[in-house]
Image: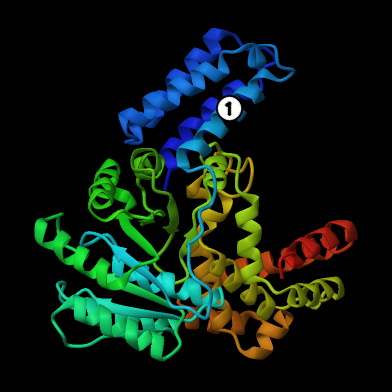
């Protein structure tokens, strides 16, 4: 998501940030290019005009032109305006304490990813220490109830469902069930339609009244651009939304929805869907998204992903193995899986400051990792623990078992040996290690 606009804005930032002196013309040209980039990203014209006017007014003052580093000062203004456009700061869900039932009502059109998002939200809240219950109140779409049940089972959360055809009765009894069984959060998956219509709004208004929801969240498809903003506005006028969840944020979309929804509706984006897995729902941080759009990376999110995938004690044990040169192919395989748990390699690269644009997507071969994993899995335990016993005949057997060529097996073993040597050298840098481990240990 946001790749196109990010590429354009990153280029503009690079051109102007290094300048020792900038003129009114430099600023005007840069802002004109930014305006074009925003319009191409399908950002609302009203939002673009407001952004351009405010940026021009602030950037054309004496503070920038006479600044010690005027280029960087201009970039900071663009960054701050982007943050403002995206919503200023992270907006948490407003839920009651664990002893009182909170209700979250999810709305959206068919195809927006509402049912999947409901399950993702339940998994996220469970991970945060709450006890969520999913309420299956989408009684219009065929198999919606079954889909929610399957997702709930995968995520280890409970779902309330029944054969009743009246969504208000389902919601009322679902909330009673939640209260009786001491759930602290009920997430209601409501019916959607292919488009907004009178019948859908009437039904959802009745469900809203029965639910007395603490949060009324619209699930909007980020791929629909400005249409998502129009949909959000229509739902808000009828039902008074408390926020928006943008699904399919990892898609090849232009970014118009993310950059317009807060300004047009006044409602914050609270979460973004960044993948198909149930864990792929992330809180929306305007400042982090703004830095990524400008190609500045997102170190905080990268560290948080590392924290969720790497245990500090395991990291220390790995460090000892590297120092003793006892790092094995089993450990190598384990690291593959941890990296995959953090997300795609491309998404991780985008979080590294300065890496965007330097490392092309074509240079990142996810298939290579899968191939290497298949090769290691085709080995015996003894071979994984001691790669030196893998002679020619074993290499042939491993290649057959993994569906690869002997060349691929040889390539992996050479790469592994080289990695061992490089990582052993790294372990000598005690200062860098302790800094990394202490950073991972924060917030644990």
Helix, strand or loop under label 1: helix
Residue 404 in view of the camera: no
Q: Residue 376: horizontal and vertical position, in percent?
A: 58, 78
Residue at 26% across, 56% down:
239
Q: Residues within 10 Å of mark 1 (few under 14, many from 20)?
A: some
Looking at the picture, the colour scheme in use is rainbow
Front-most of residues 29 and 210: 210
With 310 as the anchor, is 115 left or right in this view? left
Q: Residue 379: horizontal and vertical position, in percent?
A: 59, 85
Classify 4 as above or below 236: above
Determine which quarter of the picture holds residue 308: bottom right
Q: Which residue is mark 1?
A: 77
Front-most of residues 323 and 443: 443
How many marks are shown on the rendered structure? Answer: 1
Residue at 28% across, 49% down:
232
With 161 as the anchor, is 5 left or right in this view? right
Classify 72 as above or below 401: above
Q: Residue 359: horizontal and vertical position, in percent?
A: 57, 44
Front-most of residues 211 and 276: 211
Which quadrant, please, contains the C terminus?
Answer: bottom right
Residue 19 in view of the camera: yes
Q: Residue 118: horizontal and vertical position, in percent?
A: 36, 70
Residue at 73% across, 80% down:
388
Determine which quarter of the picture holds residue 261: top left
Determine which quarter of the picture holds residue 116: bottom left
Front-most of residues 98 and 231: 98
Residue at 56% across, 39% down:
295
């Amino acid at each position: 998501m946001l790749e196109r606009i990010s590429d354009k804005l990153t280029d503009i930032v690079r051109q102007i940030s290094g300048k020792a002196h900038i003129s009114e013309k430099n600023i005007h040209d840069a802002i004109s290019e930014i305006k074009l980039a925003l319009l191409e990203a399908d950002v609302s014209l009203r939002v673009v005009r407001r952004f351009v006017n405010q940026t021009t007014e602030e950037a054309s003052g004496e503070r920038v032109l006479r600044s010690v580093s005027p280029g960087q000062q201009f970039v900071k203004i663009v960054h701050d305006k982007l943050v403002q456009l995206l919503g200023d700061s992270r907006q948490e869900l407003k839920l009651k304490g664990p002893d009182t039932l909170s209700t979250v009502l999810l709305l959206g059109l068919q195809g927006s990813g509402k049912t999947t998002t409901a399950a993702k939200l339940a998994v996220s809240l469970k991970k945060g220490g709450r006890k969520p219950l999913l309420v299956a109140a989408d009684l219009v779409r065929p198999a919606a109830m079954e889909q929610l049940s399957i997702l709930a089972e995968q995520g280890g959360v409970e779902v309330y469902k029944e054969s009743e055809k009246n969504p208000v009765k389902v919601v009322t009894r679902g909330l009673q069930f939640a209260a009786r069984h001491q759930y602290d959060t009920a997430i209601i998956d409501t019916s959607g339609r292919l488009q907004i219509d009178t019948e859908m709004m009437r039904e959802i208004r009745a469900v809203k009244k029965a639910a007395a929801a603490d949060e009324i969240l619209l699930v909007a498809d980020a791929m629909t651009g400005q249409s998502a903003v129009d949909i959000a506005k229509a739902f808000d006028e009828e039902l008074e939304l408390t926020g928006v969840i943008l699904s399919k944020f990892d898609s090849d979309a232009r970014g118009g929805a993310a950059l317009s929804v807060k300004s047009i509706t006044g409602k914050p984006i609270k979460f973004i869907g960044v993948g198909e897995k149930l864990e792929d729902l992330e809180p929306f941080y305007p400042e982090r998204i703004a830095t990524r759009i400008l190609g500045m990376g997102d170190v905080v999110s990268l560290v948080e992903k590392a924290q969720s995938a790497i245990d500090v004690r395991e990291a220390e044990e790995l460090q000892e193995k590297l120092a003793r040169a006892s790092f094995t192919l089993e450990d190598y395989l384990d690291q593959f899986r941890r990296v995959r748990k953090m997300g795609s390699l491309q998404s991780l690269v985008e979080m590294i400051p300065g890496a965007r644009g330097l490392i092309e997507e074509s240079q990142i071969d996810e298939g290579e990792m899968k191939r290497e994993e298949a090769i290691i899995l085709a080995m015996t335990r003894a071979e994984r623990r001691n790669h030196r016993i893998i002679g020619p005949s074993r290499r042939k057997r491993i290649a057959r078992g993994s569906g690869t060529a002997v060349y691929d097996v040889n390539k992996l073993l050479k790469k592994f040996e080289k990695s061992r040597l490089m990582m052993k050298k790294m372990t000598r840098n005690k200062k860098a290690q302790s800094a990394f481990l202490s950073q991972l240990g924060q917030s644990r």
